Image (cartoon, rainbow, N blue to C red):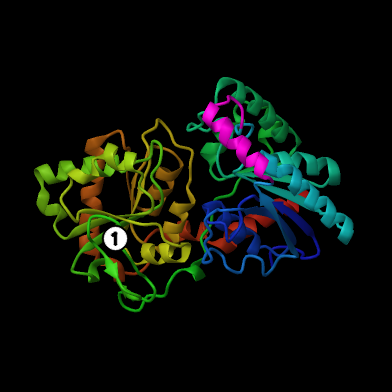
């Protein structure tokens, strides 16, 4: 048992199933494995993509789930479009485009509290979006309960932040208020703690904790030989896998070695590190890639496709496939021979993506073309292969040794890969127990 179910937990998370966002699944999984009486406040985002396979029983153990519409009015949607067209400097950037959700969310909480004579024992807010933490500031005043603020990413220190100087200044002030008022500050990696908290007083740093994302072993398909029921879908471009209904994956299919990447390419994250590495291998040692196929599963923008040079590779070496539901993404990961992480070049990366933790649950060997930092550290701890995407020779060496290992290992039918003590740290029960310990700390 993780905790006393008589304790009332109020959780604010814009993203929650069935909203198709990684944050939805992370939050739902964490709360589902707790033994608190939990009320969730989340968004009913009109027009957003939904995924019914993402933690489908997310509400089953909740006291209540308050789904608050977003965007709240037609006028607001029109104003957002006008502001974007005019490139207004702070509109939708303080802290983000979801701030207008805060007022109706607080109204829903007040009404629920009045109707049910409800007062939480502890409050948790989950960002992204960081607007959730501004709701936490108000709840701290309303209820006076201990407050834990959970950050999946840095706020003002995010290296991908493109806010103007005025918006950054205002966000620094907002972040400081949250850091001061919250009773515990939870981040997904030690690297993020160091980055974010270095600018604050030492006493605030003592409130910081690390809680990684988690995977649930029960969500992965059970292997029967090399066949897994329900793994399907067609290639978007480039030929490759085509499974109808249940199907075969990995080295069983046509004798190929299948390496998969699941996720989006956008901004500075493109397939370019992989493409450059494969070009180098093709130039000097093409036999190493015979019978190998890389699958990129998820959106690849036209700009990312063009910038990376995907079309210059031989047909069938790298194929792209359309996005799939969460359950199918886990099946595809679990039936691959190997899995791939690709990140944009950087001096140091603080990000520990939930996708990497999903990979750990799949138990397949991992190659990371990722800068030094949180992801690289974890892949190394698992026993995987890592190379900095700014170092072409290192990427080639890592990719060649990774593929050699896959060929020797015998494909997707082999047992779970990765150091067992490391994998155990990321199982949902273990992560939930760590989270429960933090909540117990707040409850005294």
**Of all residues shown, which one is farthest toward the bottom?**
224
Please check the rendered image and state whether residue 113 is part of the magenta-colored stretch, yes or no.
Answer: no
Give the crowd class for mark 1: few <14, some 14-19, many >=20 residues within 10 Å.
some
- Residue at the spot 75% in from the left edge and 47% down from the top edge: 104
Task: In the rendered view, tell whether residue 387 sits above or below residue 403.
Answer: above
Main SS type for the magenta part?
helix
- Residue at the spot 80% in from the left edge and 60% down from the top edge: 7
Relative horizontal placement of residue 124, taking residue 321 as reference (left or right): right
Where residue 227 appears, as percent x and y from the top left, is 32, 76
Please check the rendered image and state whether residue 84 is part of the magenta-colored stretch, yes or no.
Answer: yes
SS for callout 1 = loop
Where residue 25 appears, as percent x and y from the top left, is 56, 58
For disc 1, the marked residue is: 235
- Name the image quarter holding the N terminus: bottom right
Q: How many marks?
A: 1
> What's drawn in magenta, residue-wise?
73-91
Task: In the rendered view, tell whether residue 224 sits above or below residue 23.
Answer: below
Task: In the rendered view, tell whether residue 429 sits above or below residue 128.
Answer: below
Quadrant position of residue 142: top right
Where residue 234 appears, as percent x and y from the top left, is 31, 64
Where residue 333 appears, as percent x and y from the top left, is 37, 62
Relative horizontal placement of residue 156, taking residue 326 as reference (left or right): right
- Residue at the spot 21% in from the left edge and 45% down from the top edge: 311
**Foreground pick, 135 / 9:** 135
Relative horizontal placement of residue 111, taking residue 153 as reference (left or right): right
């Amino acid at each position: 048992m993780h905790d006393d179910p008589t304790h009332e937990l109020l959780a604010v998370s814009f993203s929650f199933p069935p909203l198709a966002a990684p944050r939805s699944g992370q939050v739902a999984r964490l709360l589902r494995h707790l033994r608190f009486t939990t009320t969730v406040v989340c968004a009913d985002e009109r027009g957003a993509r939904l995924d019914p396979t993402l933690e489908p029983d997310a509400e089953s153990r909740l006291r209540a789930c308050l789904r608050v519409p977003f965007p709240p009015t037609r006028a607001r949607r029109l104003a957002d479009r006008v502001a974007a067209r005019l490139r207004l400097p702070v509109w939708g950037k303080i802290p983000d485009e979801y701030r207008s959700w805060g007022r109706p969310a607080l109204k829903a909480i007040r009404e629920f509290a009045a109707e049910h004579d409800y007062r939480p024992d502890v409050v948790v807010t989950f960002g992204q979006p960081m607007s959730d933490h501004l709701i936490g500031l108000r709840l701290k005043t309303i209820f006076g309960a201990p407050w834990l603020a959970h950050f999946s990413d840095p706020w003002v220190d995010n290296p991908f932040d493109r806010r103007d100087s005025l918006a950054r200044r205002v966000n620094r002030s907002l972040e400081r208020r949250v850091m001061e008022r919250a009773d515990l500050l939870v981040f997904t990696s030690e690297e993020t703690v160091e980055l974010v908290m270095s600018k604050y007083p030492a006493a605030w740093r003592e409130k910081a904790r690390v809680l990684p994302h988690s995977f649930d072993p029960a969500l992965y398909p059970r292997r029967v030989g090399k066949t897994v029921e329900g793994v399907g879908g067609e290639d978007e471009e480039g030929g490759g896998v085509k499974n109808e209904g249940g199907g075969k994956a990995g080295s069983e299919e046509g004798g190929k070695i299948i390496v998969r990447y699941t996720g989006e390419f956008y901004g500075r994250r493109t397939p370019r590190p992989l493409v450059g590495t494969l070009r180098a291998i093709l130039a000097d040692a093409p036999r190493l890639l015979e019978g190998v196929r890389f699958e990129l599963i998820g959106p690849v923008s036209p700009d990312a496709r063009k910038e990376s040079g995907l079309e210059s590779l031989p047909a069938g070496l790298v194929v792209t496939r359309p996005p799939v539901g969460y359950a199918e993404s886990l099946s595809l990961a679990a039936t691959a021979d190997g899995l791939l992480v690709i990140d944009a070049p950087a001096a140091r990366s603080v990000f520990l993506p939930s996708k990497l933790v999903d990979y750990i649950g799949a138990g397949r060997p991992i190659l990371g073309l990722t800068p030094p930092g949180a992801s690289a550290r974890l892949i190394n701890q698992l026993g995987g292969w890592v190379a900095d995407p700014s170092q072409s020779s290192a990427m080639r060496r890592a990719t060649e040794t990774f593929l050699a290992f896959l060929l020797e290992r015998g494909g997707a039918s082999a047992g779970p890969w990765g150091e067992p003590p490391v994998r155990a740290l990321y199982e949902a029960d273990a992560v939930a127990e760590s989270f429960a310990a933090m909540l117990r700390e707040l409850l005294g």
